[in-house]
Image (spheres, helix red, strand yellow):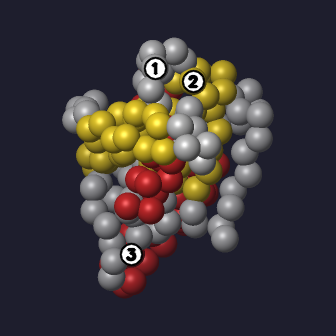
Amino acid sequence: MNATPRERNGALPSGLMTTITTHTVEYPADGLTMLGHLALPAGVDRRPAVLLGPEGTGLSDVERRRAEALAELGYVALAFDLHGGRYLGDPEEMLARCMPLLADPDRMRGIGHAALDVLRTEPRTDPDRIAAVGYGTGALSGWNSGVTASTCARSRPSTG
């Protein structure tokens, strides 16, 4: 796993400032090198964590900002990759990649498991408090990753 730290100051809704650190993390999945976006809250203690899955087009600034917002609230958050660092803005290209993934639950599960393993091995993650959320295809991958009642209090796929 490669990590490139980047610090960002952000304001909480209360007006308090917090510093978060973000890293690009590399990990293997589905025969590709995935590039996830890990956001860490200030401090050194173990924190609850959130696995965040992208839409079928892939990891974008929307999911990166969501991970950072979660870190500002005190969560370790990993926005994971579906396409080996690529964003598939062309609908035909996205469907050509996603339809076989959606048809193969084991592949989807493998992508989600790889991301979950990154999150679980992050020293700041409390392994007993992990949730999964996502958008579209990423919701299914996160849900199938093995985040179960034993690892999070509530988890439900969302496609809307």
Please state if 11 lies on the left or on the right of 24 as rendered: right
Residue contact at pointers 1 and 3, CB within 8 angstroms = no
Secondary structure under the numbered disc 2 in the rendered image: strand
Residue bearing the label numbered 2: 47
133 w.r.t. 123: above or below: below
Give the distance between the C-alpha atoms of the residues marked 3 and 2, in whole angstroms. 34 Å
Residue bearing the label numbered 1: 43
Q: Earlier in the sequence, mark 3 or mark 2?
A: 2
Quadrant where the C terminus sits is: bottom right
Secondary structure under the numbered disc 3 in the rendered image: helix
In front of the other: 95 or 44: 44
Q: Quadrant of residue 73?
A: top right
Q: Amino acid at mark 2?
A: Arg
- Identify the disc placed on residue 94: 3
Residue contact at pointers 2 and 1, CB within 8 angstroms = yes
Q: Amino acid at mark 1?
A: Gly
Q: Specify few, some or many for label 3: CA neighbours under 10 Å numbering under 14, 14-19, or 20 or more.
A: some
